[in-house]
Each structure stands twice: as structure tokens, then as C-alpha cells.
Amino acid sequence: MGHDFPNAATRARVGTCLRALALVGACFLGGAAFGDEPRLGVNFLRFFWERGDEAAQDTDEILSDLKGLGVHAMRQLVRADLLWREVEPTNDAWDFSRADAILAKGNITPIVTLFSMQYASATPPWAQGPGAFRPVMGPAARDYVETVVTRYRDRVRYWEIGNEMDHWRVSAPGSRRTPPGRRPPHTPPGGFTPEQQGQFVAQVAKVVRSLDPDAVILMPSVAGLSPYVLEEWLPGFVRGAGIDGFDVVGYHFYGGWPVFAQRRMQLSRALKKAGIAKKPVWLTETGTSGDALTTLRTNYPNSETEQAADVFRPSVLSWAAGDAAVFWHSHLSSPNRPYNRWRAYGLRRADGSATPAHTTMGLLANHLASFTEVKPVPDLDVGRVGYEFTRSDGASRWVFWGEGRVIPPARAKAYTSVIAGEDGAHHWRGMPDSLQLSTQPVLMRN
């Protein structure tokens, strides 16, 4: 069984946030859109990955796995991505062999990352030492952007300029913050402020759009929804970039699902205050560890069963809030080493075997990811979460979880737990007059 539902006070607070968030989501669904944009994706594909005892996965097997799952997009292509250090490690020494091998396939929509996975800037990867840092586009950075966009504009539509650039906070003069992992490669004497980061992103976006008018520009996804991000980084970044300097807002969320609604409401308020409330929003990273000992971000307690449940829970809440896309992080788990804070986040274990979350992802993709509308089920008692999805084929699906019993919608004909059985399959059952809920969601169909 899943973990206990939050206490009465928390249940009421969660319910209030979910109802308010659903109203906000209705506004977002009516906002800007790109037609056939992806709804569901997977991050961190270990293309051409060879690191110590971690064997590289076969590229065709990875792509086949994603296609079999039914997800729409892939993000963070590891060594096949268009990061500056991967395609031009030294000046004019270009290497597109890995990117060509993946981006030419064309069966899964790629979301490429420009410059760097963290600490993106206009500084060339070969520039070292004091004075090397470049806060604005110079000839080398312009050459890099023009070269990759010209080469891939017919294969790539979505360009994310950097990622988690809010981590540059550690370079601010006098900062005593501990970096989330490695320290930045450069320490700018005056730091790299959110406004400067916004100006840099807008400069890059202008070059990309000049070469590809159909390009969709993702701002660097923020590492979380902390007060610093919402109250300082985001407003400063938008002031620097301008409202038209990017097309899509991206954010990451790794907390437990009960706190999602409140955090997402805070993001909605911050977007409105910054004047970008009508932009599409993508949850570009979310996920849960299946390892009971990896408790930094969630502690349900964690298990592979709870991880599978979270394939549905934050995704459903995100879409219901109006987010246009959700990306699970990640595809393959990193090795189970001591002090590894990212153990067991994958849909597949480090040895390549599928987790329960892998099967659940297929269920999510096949039944919900083609939705055209999502709305809360009305009149649910406190402690119950329920949403109705209308799919592009006109069919309906419902997702419920929580505590107590629920009367199924009159049009629902069958249900299944989102957690597969011991045989690895989801078994559909006829709909009873009422159904006992738990924190593990159930999916209903008409």
C-alpha cells in the first residue's frame, strides 16, 4: 500500500490548492500553444555513454524503448546533445557525429540544450583562466549558435538555452552558498546576475530565430521553485530577457506530490507578477527515487511501487495545473554507489532491467498523454483527488487517489491500478458501485 495520506489540516490545504490550481490551469490551457507540441517526455538518455563501469546503451535500443513506451519527446541527450563542449570542444574542431546519429532518426521529438547543462554562458569551452568569462555573446558564441542551428534547424524545433542557470547564484560576490554539485567553471568577479543571464538568453534567441523563424525557445529551466527562484531569479531574468525573449517557461520539481499544488500555485503567481502568465509552461524534470535510502527529495518512504505511483501523481497534477508538457527524469538509473544522491531515479535500473515505473509510464502515455482537456472531478470530499481527461479521440479517462471510497463516474466502465501486477501487466476490472481509494492512483476508462 502507499504511504498514509497527509493529516486533516494538510488534506484541507492540499484540497484548496488543487481546486485553485485547476482554475489557474483552465486559463493556461486557453493560452499560447504550438499545435502538436509534446505532452510527455523522458530525460537523460545515455547515448554514447561510457564512464568507468557504466556501459553505454545501444542507441537504437534507447530510441526503440521510448517509442514503445509511447512518449513524445526526449530531453538531455547526454553526449548526442548540442552542448558546446560536445560539438566544438576546441575552436573550429567540430564533431557532429554523435548528434547526427540521433537527431537524424526523427521518430522522437528532441529537445536540445545549447551551451551547457549547468552554468551556461557565452564563454567558449576552451577558454580558461582569469578574465575568460563572457557574459554576452561574442564571435565564438555566435559562430557556435549559427553553426548548430543552420545544421539542425530542419530536425530540431525546441531549443533550450542552458539549464538551471539559477545555480549561478553561487558565483555572486560574497556568496556562501554550497553549489548543488560541481562549482562553476568560472568565477565572474561581479557574478552573473539573473538580469545578465536574461540578456544573454535573449541574444541567443535572436540569433536562433533569425536562422529558424519556426524555432521554439525554452528559457533555462529552473532547478526548483524556491523563494530565490520565484522572488529574485525569475523577475530578474525576465527583466533582462524581455517578455518576448523566450517562448516557454521551464521548471523542475522533485518534492513529494502533496506539496506540488502549493508550489505550483506559487509559480503561477510569480509568472503573473513577471508578466509572462500566458506563456506555455513545461515541467521539464520530475521524478522519484525507487531506493528507500535516497531520501533527500522524497521519503514516502520511497520504494519502486511509490516511484511508479509518482509517474502518475505529479504528471496528472502538472497537466491539471495547465502545464503543456511533463518530462520524467530519468530513463536509466545511475549505479547504486554510496553518496550518489540520484540513485534509482530511472525507468530502468542501472543494469537495464525495467522497473514498475517503466510499465506505468507506458500506461500514462497510452491513456492520458493525448488529452485535449483535463478538469477536476467536482464535489469530491476532502482527502480525495480526481481528474477527468478528454482524449483527442473523444474518449474519457479518470484518475483518482486519496483516502476513503469514491463513487465512479457514471460513464466509467472499467478500472485498473496504475501499479502493474506481479506478471508486469495492468489488469482491467469491471466498475463496482464504489471503490476504495489509496495513495496509489487508479485509472478508469469509458
Image (cartoon, rainbow, N blue to C red):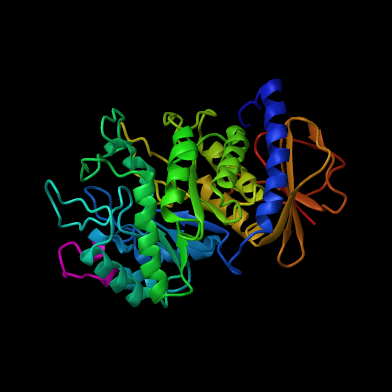
| Residue 256, x across and y down, in percent | 55, 34
Q: Which of these two is toward me, 34 or 256? A: 34
| Residue 86, x across and y down, in percent | 25, 61
- In magenta stretch: residue 236: no
- The residue segment tinted magenta is 86-98
| Residue 195, x across and y down, in percent | 38, 47
Taking the spot 69% from the left edge, 21% from the top edge, the residue there is 9
In the image, 389: left or right of 110?
A: right
- In magenta stretch: residue 92: yes
Q: Which of these two is toward me, 72 or 445? A: 72
In the image, 229: left or right of 134?
A: right
Image quadrant holding the C terminus, namely bottom right
Residue 251's place in the image compared with 380, above or below, is: below
Q: Which of these two is toward me, 168 or 179? A: 168
In the image, 74: left or right of 321?
A: left
Q: Main secondary structure of the magenta part?
A: loop
Taking the spot 28% from the left edge, 53% from the top edge, the residue there is 121
Taking the spot 48% from the left edge, 67% from the top edge, the residue there is 109
Q: Is residue 422 visible?
A: no
